[in-house]
Amino acid sequence: MKNAIAPIWKLAATTLTVLVAIGFAVPVISTPASAQQRRVERLTILEMLFGKRQRRPVDVYPNRPTRTAKPRAAKPRKRSAAPVETVKKKQAPPPVAKLDNAKKVLVVGDFFAGGLGDGLQVAFETSPGVVIETRSNVASGLVRSDYYDWQTQLPKFLDETVPAVVVVMLGANDRQQMAVNGSKEKFRTENWFKEYEARALALGKQVADRKIPLLWVGLPAFESPSMTADAVQLNGLLKSQVEKVGGEFIDIWDGFVDEDGRFVITGSDINGQQVRLRGSDGINMTKAGKRKVAFYVEKPVRRLLGDMASPDLIKLDAESLPDLVKLPPGEVKDMSRTPPINLSDPALDGGTELMGARAAPVLLAKTARDKLLEDGEMPPPPAGRVDNYAMPSSTTATSR
């Protein structure tokens, strides 16, 4: 019996061994799509022997939203471009027409004078009674009369323009030797200064002899310390000579230095805004610098020209006279004239009539106005007014 059972156990063990080997050898087949999204468990030995139980596949990414095919959006139709509204730029107002009898301001000198003339053009562009005439030579001065002689040229300009005011700005090019009586004098020598004063005085007298107001503009500070020191000395010489002929020296020094008196390239313009005033060379003026120099000259020019320098000046002629009420001569004779009414309250003066009707009464006692101005005593307020703080009388309280 034992010999019969032994082959059966051997057969069963062999079969079990073969089944296990087949179980490990069979691969799990899955589609590429399911392999990426889901994981299927392998078959166990019991499932191979007794069959597979139905199981739900395990989702590897349970929280991943399922992708759905989105409908393809239709391409938008091309719309015709809307018409672009063109923004019109504001046109600059036309220049103010100058009057036929406008006063002329003659500006003469070197390159600084040329910039000053440009600044004055802007300052008086809205003044119909002022015309700016500029006659400048960039490299001119009082020293090199062989290059440009202002003593000869200035009378020609005066006859040509017939100015009401003459503005001179010279000296920036004069830091060099000067020919004096056939010899060359170096800058800063005693003879140089004496000749320079004589030439400045002679130029100023040409204007003063014609009874024309003279304004002489001083030199500003420079970036070079040596040029700045020379400008200080030249300003002193020019001021003394200009005042001898009755001219006015205009000092612009403080407008181009800081509070410590040092040269500045950037500073305040005429509106108080920080702008660049000088060029990169430390000598020339920018547009804002030219306007600032003109700002110093504008005030005395307006003072000398009076109403002609007003921007609100209009020309009155037969075409621009205002409409006046014209009465027949008979009605003018019979016109009744009303005396003026006192600007203050007549009751304060002690009278109730119009001024001029009769002589003012002579009052011995002080009027209400005199009491208010001299003694600070105010008249009593009327009864019932808000500032009447007196207690009501008994009759008034009883009636109420």
Image: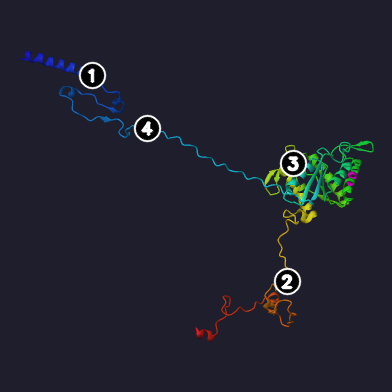
Q: Nearer the viewer, mark 1 or mark 3?
A: 3
Between discs 2 and 4, the one toward the N terminus: 4
- Which residue is under mark 3? 285
- Which residue is under mark 1? 24
| Total tally of numbered discs in the picture | 4
* Pointer 2 with pointer 4, Cβ within 8 A: no
Badge 2: residue crowd in 10 Å (few <14, some 14–19, many ≥20): few
Could you say which is closer to the camera, residue 235 or residue 169? Answer: 169
Would you place residue 185 above or below residue 122 in this image? above
Residue 107: percent from left, percent from top: 81, 45
Between discs 1 and 3, the one toward the N terminus: 1
Q: What residue type is labelled 4?
A: Arg
Residue 218: percent from left, percent from top: 81, 46
Q: Nearer the viewer, mark 2 or mark 1?
A: 2
- Is residue 67 left or right of 94 when viewed as pictured? left
Between discs 2 and 1, the one toward the N terminus: 1
Between discs 2 and 3, the one toward the N terminus: 3
Q: Which amino acid does label 3 sit on?
A: Met
